[in-house]
């Protein structure tokens, strides 16, 4: 059909999260090595305009809230003409790998978040 499959957007959002954390100085790999997982508990996508095959897409990702064990990311995906393709949000939960229960984010993560807010 020439359109980007709607299910692909969840993967694009994941790339946005990974790169946002990397820019802050934190990696998913390091979080996992430190005993944390970050499963998605909520995903909301508002489709604004279709993306087509070979479109160059950019994913703007912002951490909008860290509350308790939860972290919220908001996204805007645009094509190369700056047209908004989707607006989305995800909520992830910090979970201990050993207990599989929600836990507070690691202190080194919260320190990075607070440094970027100042």
Image (cartoon, rainbow, N blue to C red):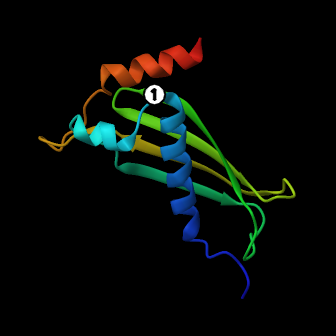
What residue is rendered at 62% in x and 51% in y? 88
The correct choice, above or below, for 110 with respect to 77 in the image is: above
The correct choice, above or below, for 42 with respect to 66 in the image is: below
Determine the residue located farthest toward the top in the rendered image: 118
Q: Quadrant of the C terminus?
A: top right
Q: Residue 92 lies in what quarter of the image?
A: top left
Towards the viewer: 81 or 90: 81
What residue is rendered at 46% in x and 43% in y? 91
Towards the viewer: 106 or 7: 106
Q: Quadrant of the N terminus?
A: bottom right
The x and y percentages for residue 5 are 62, 76
Q: Residue 81 lies in what quarter of the image?
A: bottom right
Left or right of residue 47, residue 8 in this image:
left
The residue identified by callout 1 is 66
Left or right of residue 24, residue 1 in this image:
right
The x and y percentages for residue 2 are 73, 84
């Amino acid at each position: 059909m020439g359109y980007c499959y709607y299910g692909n957007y969840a993967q694009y959002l994941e790339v946005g999260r990974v790169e946002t954390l990397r820019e802050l100085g934190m990696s998913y790999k390091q979080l996992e090595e430190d005993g944390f997982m970050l499963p998605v508990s909520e995903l909301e996508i508002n489709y604004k305009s279709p993306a087509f095959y070979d479109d160059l897409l950019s994913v703007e990702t912002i951490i909008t809230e860290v509350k308790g064990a939860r972290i919220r990311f908001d996204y805007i995906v645009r094509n190369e003409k700056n047209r908004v393709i989707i607006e989305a949000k995800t909520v992830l939960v910090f979970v201990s790998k050993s207990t599989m229960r929600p836990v507070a984010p690691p202190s080194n993560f919260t320190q990075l978040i607070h440094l970027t807010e100042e």
